[in-house]
Amino acid sequence: MQASRARLFKEYKEVQREKSADPDIQLVCDDSNIFKWTALIKGPSETPYEGGVFQLAFAIPEQYPLLPPQVRFLTKIFHPNVHFKTGEICLDILKNAWSPAWTLQSVCRAIIALMAHPEPDSPLNCDSGNLLRSGDVRGFQSMARMYTRLAAMPKKT
Amino acid sequence: MDPEEDMHDARGESSQEEEDFYSEGYPSDGEDEDDDGDDAGYDFVDNDSDDPSTDVRRLQQNYTTLNEENISQRQADDINRVSTVLSIKRWEACVLLRHYNWSVSKVHDEWFADEENVRKTVGLLEKHIEMPNKRELTCGICFENYPRDTMKASPCGHPFCFSCWRGYISTSINDGPGCLMLRCPDPTCRAAVGLDMVDSMASREDREKYARYLRRSYVEDNRKTKWCPAPGCEYAVEFVMGSGSYDVCCKCSYSFCWNCTEEAHRPVDCGTVARWILKNSAESENMNWILANSKPCPKCKRPIEKNQGCMHITCTPPCKFEFCWLCLGPWTEHGERTGGFYACNRYESAKQEGAYDESERRREMAKNSLERYTHYYERWAANQSSRQKALTDLQALQNEKLEKLSDRQSQPESQLKFITDAWLQIVECRRVLKWTYAYGFYLHENEHAKRQFFEYLQGEAESGLERLHQCAEKELQVYLEAETPLKDFNDFRTKLAGLTSVTRNYFENLVRALESGLNDVGPSNSQAGSNQAACSKSSSSKSLAPGKSKSGKSRTGGAATSSRSGSSRGMDDSIWTCDSCTCTNPKSNSHCQACDRHR
Ligand SMILES: [Zn+2]
Ligand SMILES: [Zn+2]
Ligand SMILES: [Zn+2]
Ligand SMILES: [Zn+2]
Ligand SMILES: [Zn+2]
Ligand SMILES: [Zn+2]
Ligand SMILES: [Zn+2]
């Protein structure tokens, strides 16, 4: 508990210091609870998520960093490895391939990479996985783009 | 080719574990048998028994039971061997062996074929890299700075502080046996973290857990060893591949098939067992009623509970009707039709003579074509529960009855071993007999000659066993209840010991015959006939080699010489039944082999 708090505090200071180091990721620690974080990540360019901003929620276990944080999308996203309803993410480094040397920052980077390179063979979102697996890339992209526009872009009023 | 590949078909391989197979009429073990199995064995050319080498091989068990200490010792030996041969550290040898499922030869092969590739796969660095040479280093997990000499690293040189290492190792150990393949925490690095790191940093509790996983892995990931499947048993059994029968008997006394880990099931093969178990579970609902312990007496209709092991049931007074538990027919009518006086194994005859219409339910089942299965299942299950009962009886015998008997008959308990032997034999025979019903169920219906021969052998086995079971169960009772003249008790001893050895021989031969697929039984009748002769001959002859007799009386082993003459089709030509003790004897014997009375 003490160790995870200390480690999270180090990550917090690092984030404050390097605010502009990675313009695609903006990590924010909950004011009252260092075990709750959120992040805003930019959809990678040349993907159907380009132009969108996606919010992630982190719940960090007491054994962090020996155990991985739990992360999910708060913003709706149409992606084969993200559960459409709950935002749960299927990503190996968040499970058995976790290394305690990873940080919340590196988790965000891995999620951005996953957005650019979906793994249709381990789908949490079957519709989306099936589109890709059947080779309907255009169908997939237009769905993903539509949801990006609907959920991840500032509403034009 | 790897001989350890996959499941092996047990049929066609024969056992080498018996010490004393006196094999007149059967081929010697191993020798002329090979993987295409089915055409091997079961011919009756006199082709061995004076080659001493085969006898030596028979004496060698093809498996070893290992306790915890043995397992650790073997594991340590293997690790030392690999460590010496490859000139690597012991922990490195351990990582290597784990990766190649504890096969020393595989480790050697892979290593000498491509050491670099093996090192890369397993995470063993050839050159150890020192931690960065600075006074203070940053731990890669907690990101704190510590003096260099308080940090530790795998040979990759990635430094982590002591408490982070400890947490990292502990998390992995508590996550399961994957801890045996632990790698450096740095995600870009695949360097192995082995036993030395665990031993130098983990808590005592974690070290013990790790050692347990290591031992478990040595048994479970190793193709040569398996845990004994008996509940609560902690022994493992190491098996020598390709060495014959898969039946092994753990030191805890549980017998199981090493190949499929079901209970021992000779003479049927693993595939048949799997099919049979599947079939049983599919039919389980229909079969529940059959297993019920009580049936109405066929004469007075009162419910009778079967509380004895043998199938010969006598209704309570005043009815006292004697009937067969299996077919509910009168015991006296048992004979040729049902497979023998003591036997009730024939499916066809029972069916044809309409013995199956005892209830509406059965007729319904017949309609559903379950009838055939029911016949076999009922007998399979009856032998199973009879075996259970025999085990219980054996226990009671050992716990109290032998002592009582010893008092009553003024015999030292050491002189009563023949009774325990009889019961052990009953337990084993019930097991074999049980599986012959699965065998029968899968025997092709249109292989008439084979089926006929099979049912003959099975019927003989069943009568022999019933005789033994009755003798051990009911006749023993007399001597438990009252003092009797010494001569009577000695007669009982002679009879029971004789039945035990005759039955043992018969069943051993039966197992061999069935394992060889009854292959010599073809369309030719004369061949089938001579088979039978050979079977009854060798079955009754073998145990009577001098010195084998449990009663200590010396008898002639004369049967070995002849009875090949009795090769006619008639089932009983080659044997005669003793009027005095009902034991079956080869024609060539002028005296009963069990009680020594003249024919
Ligand atoms: Zn540390
Ligand atoms: Zn490393
Ligand atoms: Zn055991
Ligand atoms: Zn088996
Ligand atoms: Zn009755
Ligand atoms: Zn019967
Ligand atoms: Zn006799």
Image (spheres, coloured by chain):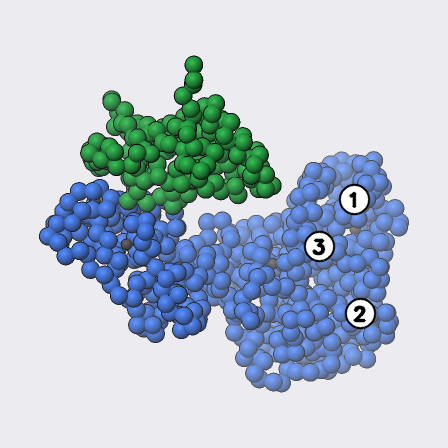
Q: Position of residue B527 (x, y in %)?
A: 83, 74
Q: Name the residue at 35% across, 43% down.
A: A98
- Cα distance, mark 2 to mark 3? 19 Å
Q: Position of residue B386 (x, y in %)?
A: 65, 50
- Of labels 2 and 3, earlier in sequence is 3
Q: Which chain is blue?
A: B
Left or right of residue A57: residue B504:
right
- The residue wearing badge 1 is B370
Left or right of residue A96: residue B238:
right
- Cα distance, mark 3 to mark 1? 15 Å
Q: Which chain is green?
A: A
Q: Name the residue at 30% across, 27% down.
A: A36
> How many dots with numbers?
3
As helix, strand or loop, the secondary structure at mark 2 comes to loop
Category of crowding for the residue at label 3, using alpha-carbon neighbours closer than 10 angstroms: few (below 14), some (14–19), many (at least 20) = many
Does residue B598 appear in the picture of this structure?
no
Amino acid bearing label 1: Leu
Residue situated in front as seen by the camera: B380 or A47: A47
- Quarter of the displayed picture in which ligand 1 can be seen: top left
Q: Is residue B74 above or below residue B205?
A: below
Residue situated in front as seen by the camera: B84 or B318: B84
Amino acid bearing label 2: Val
- Cα distance, mark 1 to mark 2? 28 Å
Chain of residue at mark 1: B
**Same chain? Circles 1 and 2:** yes
Category of crowding for the residue at label 1, using alpha-carbon neighbours closer than 10 angstroms: few (below 14), some (14–19), many (at least 20) = some
As helix, strand or loop, the secondary structure at mark 3 comes to helix
- The residue wearing badge 3 is B438
- The residue wearing badge 2 is B521
- Of labels 3 and 1, earlier in sequence is 1
Residue A12 found in image quarter? top left
